[in-house]
Image (tube, rainbow, N blue to C red):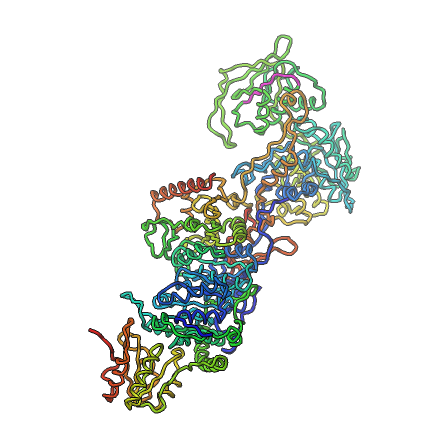
Amino acid sequence: MKKVLMGNFAASHGVRLSRAQVISAYPITPQTHVVEELSAMVARGDLNAKFIKVESEHSALACCIAASVMGARAFTATSSHGLLLMHELLHWAAGGRLPIVMVAVNRAIAPGWNIWNEQTDTLSQRDTGWIQLYCASNQEILDTVIQAFKLAESVKIPVMVIYDAFILSHTYEPVDIPDQKVVDKFLPPINNPEALKVGEARAFGSVTNPDFHMEFRLKLHDTYERAMEKFSEIDAEYAKLTGRNYGIVEPYQCSDAELIMVTAGSLAGPTRMVVDGLRAKGIKAGRVKLKMFRPFPVEALKEALKPAKKILVLDRNLSPGTGGIFAQELRVALKEDKRPVWGFVAGLGGRDITPELIESMFFDALGAEVPVSNTIFKGVRL
Amino acid sequence: MLGELIQFHSIEELPDSPVTLGTTLWNPTGTWRSVRPVHVTRLSPCMLGCPAGNPIESFIRKIEEGDVDGALALIREENPLPAICGRVCFHPCEEACNRASMDASVAIHELERWVADRGKWRPTVPEKETGKSVAVVGSGPAGLTAAYHLRRLGHAVTVFEKEKELGGLLRYGIPAYRLPKDVLDREIGFLREMEIIFRTETTLSESDFEKEGFQAVLFAVGAQRFRDPRLVHQEGEGAWKALEFLKKVNEGEIKGLKGKVVVIGGGNAAIDAARCALRLGGQVTVAYRRMREDMPAFDEEVAAAEAEGISFVFLAVPQSVKRDGKGEVTGVGFARAKAGSLDASGRHKITVDPHDTFSIEADTVILATGEEPDEIPWQVDYKPEATRCETDRPGVFVAGDVVGSQRTVAYAIGWGKRAAVAIDAFLAGKEAELEKITLPGGEGISMRAYRGEVTIPEGEAVSFEEVNDFYFPDVKRAAPRRLPMAQSVSGFKEVVKGLSKPQALREAGRCFHCGDCVMCDNCLIFCPDIAITRKEDASGYDVDLDHCKGCGICARECPRGAIIMVEERV
Amino acid sequence: MIEPTYTIEESEELVHPGHLACQGCGATIAMRYVLKALGKKTVVVIPACCWSIIVGLFPSSCLDVPLIHTAFETAAAAATGARAALDVQGQEDVNVLAWAGDGGTFDIGFQALSGAAERNENIIYCCYDNEAYMNTGIQRSSATPVGAWTTTTPQGGLEDRPKKDIVRIMAAHNVPYTATANVAFPDDLYQKIKKAASYKGMKFIHILSPCPTGWRIPSSESIEVARLATLSNVFPLYEVINGSKWRVTYIPQKKVPVEKYLEAQARFRLMGEEEKKRIQKNVDEYWKELLKRAKR
């Protein structure tokens, strides 16, 4: 069934179709609609879940963690400061190997207060052990939420489904809502054999001394690596049922591209437009949309970037003093590579990234053998 | 008991996250311990206080358990005269009772009496006769006790009593309002059922002893010899020696007294005589040479006498019995004394001014100035307080007031027990090992320990500091029912009527049971290490020493000092 | 018959020996009786506190029921989540017990606690209060009484702020059941937990749990000192139904001066006579007010 939905509602429908059992959330702009719609769904009886209106994001995730430990399918949604408040518990969820799914709407971090789009919030959670999936459209949001539950439950690692504030969260797009039967076939009820059961004397998260801590982290690390493969399988299975899939990375016009720009999230759309424009001008431009950031898909990126002579990264985020986080990660992934990497930082705190601005980045790279600096800020106003 | 620690041999065996798989039982936290708790049975102070060696704490526990007969059987293992002791003993056990430091001591004597009056018990004839024969001379409490225990040990026993009836001081000295004669008869009746032979109005000569084939003899002839105050004009009508007076009263030969009666003395005989005189119609004054608090009589007795209307005059040193021309008593002349500092016995020293005199009118005078041990009619010598009851002649023993200075029924019973043990050992050709059966720090001995049925706990008795008084809420000490005053003073009916059943049960509940585990579960309840469990047969507790960390809470929270902490040897 | 002193029913021990509590730990005794009252159909949630350690290191647990360890400030939130999961699974008869120390309750976990109370989550929240951050080495918490020495109040009484009145605060949330309890009164504790379990909604039990290490007392005196707290009215035993019906559950037979309680513990050794007198006055006033609230 097709419906015109804003991104946040697309997320809510994904959660409904996934039959989440425990939802715990705290309101924060621009995530608010997700939980508003979910509470309405629960109230209407469209979703048979416990919806807990906690008093903070920290409690929201704590609540999901315990529910997940007890074997329930748990979901939360947040953004920006809320996500940062959850930081401690992000580690708990991943270290505890709990298949929780979260929607994180990318928003800038204060000060000053800024509710607009920026991806620094989720990217600064990159070491918590959560799988991160960035979405480029409302349809992708809905689909990814459903896939995320399946992925989380099959590798026992929590998954963050991420999309941009306002650009997606508050923007209406036509979205195909799959049939519940289709989703049920794809995503069976949760069955976590390691969940605690009443009557059993097991303790989750016990004090672990140096004899074991490292082994647990190694196990997490190894499984994390496998999560990429697993996602590809799930993505393919989903495609069979719905005709839609997104891939870990989505190359566009890359097969013969000399200049390839790497970006994530809603920037996939404008960058695609710009590539088309450049192609019309005879410039062999291409674009790679990064869906999965954690685990970082090194091999898939290398493959997609193979034809490029020059690589561009567009980051709507900043690690102050270091630059764009995607660029940083990519440079590490390509460390054996001699090709120059242009690291562009733009659109922080919701500033517009216009097609012209993106185009100018391609021209920067065209006009030089190597970048003028590691990090190039674009669209600076003053 | 230790469990096993789960081992992992490969990373695959590890769960995905730290979710536990087993218990902590493998962890030997007992190694943290420097002291370990040990459940022990310790002496309770009451038992040390009892010269008769009554099993006080355990018989009270039987009462609490609802087993009155069991309580009585326990007492009778040690003491053949509980109905008597419960009435007339001055209960030093109660002075020793730890509860006295909290509110008031447990009314142990009332409980003993209640058990003796209510409990059912039948004497038995020993299963095995030793073929040995023992003579006991004197049927007072010491003689009766010795006879009872010797008989239980399998010896044939013959008791010789010079008076017409049995009981000695119990019959002729103690008035019926304190000890009804049927109570005494009942106790003696039990002894008869045990086939102890009693010969009254008989003495035992040395030749008869040999002729009749006795292997040992015990003299328990008491102390009834009059200690003469040598007052001017004391000889003659109207002036009684206290014991003679009491004997006549007890025999029913004195039916009434008229006028004023002055009793001279401050001991129990003085009070008994005074209270008897009152009951016979006299107007009684007790005159004592020292102060009220110096009186050797039991305080309760003095108080009862006061309550009944007997007057007391203190610091009055008797000089003469005043008589008129016809020789009839008209009064008693005294010299006034002054009280000084305390002497070694804790009583006031007095100084007498022979010129400061006064007199009290009297129609009858009773001299209760004390008694001396009676003479043993044989050629035999012995030392006072001879704890093994021995004399200079093998086979001849002494017990009771004749040898001991503490002349009370309880002490006499204690003497009787010691004599029985000494004689039993003598008959077996052994030395009596009294030390092994004497409660450490006390005077009483345990016949059950002598027979090897129990062992006497070692170490000191439980002190009040070791009792956790929180667990004992205040409960008022039981006051026994009493005969109304008007009835009390008009006859010889027993004044104290003992406890009712609810009173007795509540009173028994006041007992701390010092040093004796009653399975209250406190140790188990408060153990942070879950290391204490009840034994399956409910005979006590087991301590899981693999896990007990030795915190000591159990010992501290034991209400009755029945857990001690013992240092671990390194 | 020797009357039984306790009404605690015979039941399986749900705390195993071999745990890692210090000698004489009151919190361990508290857990024993709380679990005895709740039984095997219970899920326990423990935030960072002494009990995170006491319960044992991976792969061992001393509890015979499922346990969720959770972050310091999250006991009430995690309990909420466990409750939600059980409810959605149709296991509404299972008790969820949040078991937190005073730091995790009075301080860092207070927000989550207040939130859960406001939502009237169907959980039993027990704060075992040993009156400081004992697990980390005796630092002051807002449950530390006036005048107590801790490693962060080395001058003892100089930091003159009264202990947070947590039960009144919780009662002010108008939850079905709030109560105080004391490990020295296990019967009262047991009965209160039984009672708590009979209510649907938020239950809060504040349990005084002596810590020999932090209170500077011999381990053997743990219970004795805790008992003095109640006998001296420093820690009265009471309960509040629906935030309005107050009932004192234990009235000391004999009044014990506060001084006796303070002097039994070396943590109060820096306290002056004047201070002790002031505390006695405060305790007396609080007790009077409590009785008034309880309409006694």
Q: Position of residue C4 (x, y in %)?
A: 60, 47
Q: Position of residue C99 (x, y in %)?
A: 47, 58
Can the viewer see residue B14?
no
| Residue range (magenta) | B280-288
Residue A357 occupies quadrant: bottom left
Q: Which residue does the image show at 56% across and 67% down from the upper left?
A: B3
Residue lying furthest right in this view? B211
Seen from the viewer's position, the closer of residues C203 and B411 is: C203
Q: Which residue does the image show at 24% across and 85% down from the upper left?
A: A364
As drawn, A101 above or below B569: below
As drawn, B502 above or below A325: above
Q: Which residue does the image show at 68% across and 49% down from the upper left?
A: B453
Q: Position of residue A235 (x, y in %)?
A: 46, 80
As drawn, A45 above or below B7: above
> In the figure, is residue B535 to the left or right of A349?
right
Quadrant of the rendering where the N terminus of chain C is positioned: top right
